[in-house]
Image (cartoon, rainbow, N blue to C red):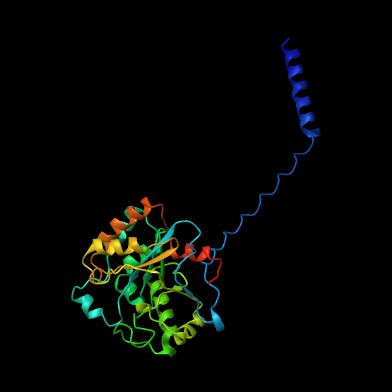
Amino acid sequence: MIIRVRQVAAACALGAALTACTAAPEAPRAARPAPSAPAAPSRPPTLAPGPAGLTPVFENGPRTHGRTVALTFDADMTADQGPRAAAGERFDNPRLIAALRALKVPATVFMTGRWAEEYPTQARSIGRDPLFEVANHSYSHYAFTGDCYGLPTVPEDRMRADVEHAYAAFRKAGVPDARPYFRFPGGCYDRGALKALTPAGVTAVQWDVVSGDAFATDADAVARQVLDGVRPGSVVVMHCTRSAAPATERAVRTIVPELRAKGYRFVKVSELIGATGGRR
């Protein structure tokens, strides 16, 4: 009986071996698809050049694309204000930025290169926060025309270099992708300035609502001026400089809930420009 069992086992083992040898070969595994390359970041929307190829100027978005509004904040600091900053004057406003984050308000910060040099940690924090976008407000905050609120003037042949100097300061501070939008210091420009900046490939961004926050101390008055002026597609100009606009943060805490109660949605300038389809 033991011999018989062993014979049966041996036969089974031989059968298994023969079956394995004659089995169909395993089908080749399908090749793994090659990993797709990461999508290139899309270029922020800009406007088509103006007449004669001049730098285009944007003031507000479409009035018929829903209740959208862009709050913009100028982070001003002129090239010669370093001694004042060293003496303790504050050209930043961390509490304003904190309020925008707490309220979840997207915003566009027009920053001077000199401000980014003075406050690189804040510039980097703003530039890397998806809630915000950083745009160019010149390096020096010198005027691009004569007779502009008493500001020193950039010579026409240095205007493009001043703008590019600001972008270099942003990169050095760690701002990853400053937008191709430029705001003239004081909002002052002429045909010569628009022509000088054409090679820079920027869209000049103005506004249609003046907040009046510069040097204001009455936050309620600033808020009321904004609330009275906003229309669908509006661009509001405000400031992110504590010493020159001390009431802005308090005004924003009033403006935001009231506009939301009226059905407004806050957007960045890039969204308003994108809604125009590139048209002026």
In the depicted structure, whether residue 15 falls above or below residue 35: above
Image-quadrant location for residue 97: bottom left
In the depicted structure, whether residue 204 falls above or below residue 250: below
Q: Nearer the viewer, residue 247 or 212?
A: 212
Image-quadrant location for residue 35: bottom right
Side (left or right) of 110 relative to 23: left
Residue at the extreme front: 228
Side (left or right) of 242 relative to 47: left
In the depicted structure, whether residue 109 falls above or below residue 258: below
In percent of width and height, residue 41 lies at 53, 63
Residue under the image location 33 percent in, 69 percent down: 120
Q: Nearer the viewer, residue 191 or 221?
A: 221
In percent of width and height, residue 224 lies at 29, 61
Q: Nearer the viewer, residue 236 or 88?
A: 236
Image-quadrant location for residue 7: top right
In the depicted structure, whether residue 240 falls above or below residue 191: above
Quarter of the rendering occupied by the N terminus: top right
Question: How many tags in the picture?
Answer: 0
Side (left or right) of 60 relative to 114: right
In percent of width and height, residue 235 lies at 41, 66
In percent of width and height, residue 19 lies at 79, 29
Residue under the image location 44 percent in, 65 percent down: 269
Residue under the image location 33 percent in, 60 percent down: 227
Residue at the extreme right: 22
